[in-house]
Image (spheres, rainbow, N blue to C red):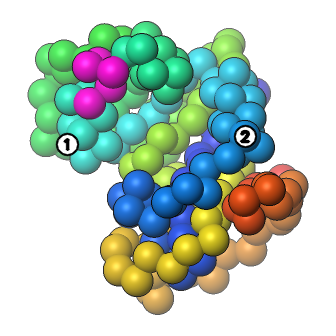
Amino acid sequence: MRKVTAGLFTSIDGVVQDPYEFQYDSFDDELGAAMTAWMAATDTVLLGRNSYLEWSEWWPAHADDPFGQWINPIEKHVASTTLGDDLAWENSTRITGDVPAFVRELQRRDGADIAVCGSVTLVRSLLFAGVLDELQLMVHPAIAGHGRKLFEPTDPPTRLRLVANAVTSKGNVLSTYGRFDA
């Protein structure tokens, strides 16, 4: 069965929105290597509406960037009830119906890992539905001070299992968590 993963850049105070505002110069070779390995293990991407709209404008125009070279041609599925089915970004289709059920069906198909990119709402939804197999938090040594956080005070208590943990030369902490029951 294919693994569903998510990786989010975050600040020490838990902000995951607009990481370019707090990453500063902390992006280092080790973080780049971890991202490269994550991308190499993935052949399908899940996006929420907001991430799709933002990224579909940016990445096709930056096809020479290593991430652009990866994200543009990859199979992309978009969770949205408001977008139409005529998604312009190459290899993009809209998920219709129940999103966790769709992802479970994707897991049963042949292929490599399935990655949720950006899309905080989608990450949360799949995590609390028990569909997300691994969540990697890439904590930058910075306090953002404002912005959307991954978790909210109304979230249900949820136990996770630490799968891997590393500290990079510039002080990023890469922690990967799995479902406790897995």
| Residue 139 appearing in the image | yes
Residue at (72, 24) in percent of width and height: 41
Check disc 1 and report the residue beneath it: 81
State the image coordinates of residue 145 (x, y, percent, origin top left): 40, 83
3 or 174: which is nearer to us? Answer: 174
Left or right: 166 in relation to 119: right
Residue at (51, 79) in percent of width and height: 143
Q: Quadrant of residue 40?
A: top right
Q: Is residue 61 magenta?
A: yes
Category of crowding for the residue at label 1, using alpha-carbon neighbours closer than 10 angstroms: few (below 14), some (14–19), many (at least 20) = few
Provide the residue span drawn in magenta: 58-62
Judging from the image, what secondary structure is the residue with disc 1 in? Answer: loop
State the image coordinates of residue 59 (x, y, percent, origin top left): 32, 25
Q: Quadrant of residue 158?
A: bottom right
Check disc 2 and report the residue beneath it: 29
Left or right: 141 in relation to 161: left
Magenta: main secondary structure: helix
Residue at (42, 14) in percent of width and height: 64
In the rendered view, would you say 137 is above or below 112? below
95 or 59: which is nearer to us? Answer: 59
Compare marks 1 and 2 and give the one earlier in the sequence: 2
In the rendered view, would you say 16 is above or below 49? below
